[in-house]
Structure formats: structure tokens, C-alpha cells
Amino acid sequence: MAHAPSAKRHIRADEKKRIRNKARKSAITTFEKKFNAFLSEGNTEEAKKALQVCFSAYDRAAKKGVVKKSTADRKKSRLNLALNKASK
């Protein structure tokens, strides 16, 4: 257990950050599931809209440090490939 006041503040701040980061990751997962649901239905127009939401969420998460930039880029690339494959 932390004894210094600054260490106690860091513990409180870290918990808030953990909760915030978990919410962001969960939102990204939800957006991906919606995108994949549209793809499986064959609804490419809705999938394109959902893809833009996914891209935006990944960019924001990478900017905030929730996910690494290269991870966000890789996931965005794979989502885009899936859409292109389904559009053909």
C-alpha cells in the first residue's frame, strides 16, 4: 500500500484511467461487432458507415494512447480488406 500522498493520488488517477481506457476498448469492440454484423448480412452500405465509425474510434484511441498506433493501423487495414472482399 502506498504511503506518500502523491503515490495515493497516482493510485486514484490510475484507476480512473483504467476505467476510461476499458470503456474506450469496449466501444471499439462494439463498433467492430456491428461492422461485422452488417458484412455478414451483406449490407455493404451500412458496413461502410460502420467502418468510418470504427476508423474514427481507432484513431481516437491511438491518439489517447489506449492502443498503439501500429495496432490501430493494422486493425483498420484488416477491416477495410474485409469490406473490399465482401463488396466484390
Image (cartoon, rainbow, N blue to C red):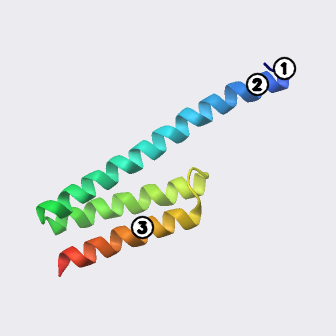
Q: For the residues marked 3 and 2, what is the alpha-carbon distance in whole angstroms?
A: 36 Å
* Identity of the residue furthest to the front in this view: 1
Q: Residues within 10 Å of mark 2 (few under 14, many from 20)?
A: few
Amino acid type at image mark 1: Pro
Q: Is residue 13 above or below residue 75?
A: above
- The count of marks equals 3
Residue 9's disc number? 2
Q: Position of residue 81 (x, y in %)?
A: 33, 75
Q: Are marks 2 and 1 in contact (CB under 8 Å)?
A: yes
Q: Are marks 3 and 1 in contact (CB under 8 Å)?
A: no
SS class of the residue under badge 2? helix
Amino acid type at image mark 3: Lys
Quarter of the picture containing the C terminus is bottom left
Q: Position of residue 54 (x, y in %)?
A: 37, 58
Q: Earlier in the sequence, mark 3 or mark 2?
A: 2
SS class of the residue under badge 1? helix
Q: Residue at x 61, y 36 (%)?
A: 17
Q: Which residue is mark 3?
A: 76
Q: Position of residue 10 (x, y in %)?
A: 75, 29
Residue 5's disc number? 1
Q: Quadrant of residue 26?
A: top left
Q: Are marks 3 and 2 in contact (CB under 8 Å)?
A: no
Q: Residue at x 63, y 29 (%)?
A: 15
Amino acid type at image mark 2: Arg
Q: Earlier in the sequence, mark 3 or mark 1?
A: 1
Does 84 sit left or right of 26 as displayed?
left
Does 56 sit left or right of 43 as displayed?
right
Q: Residues within 10 Å of mark 3 (few under 14, many from 20)?
A: some
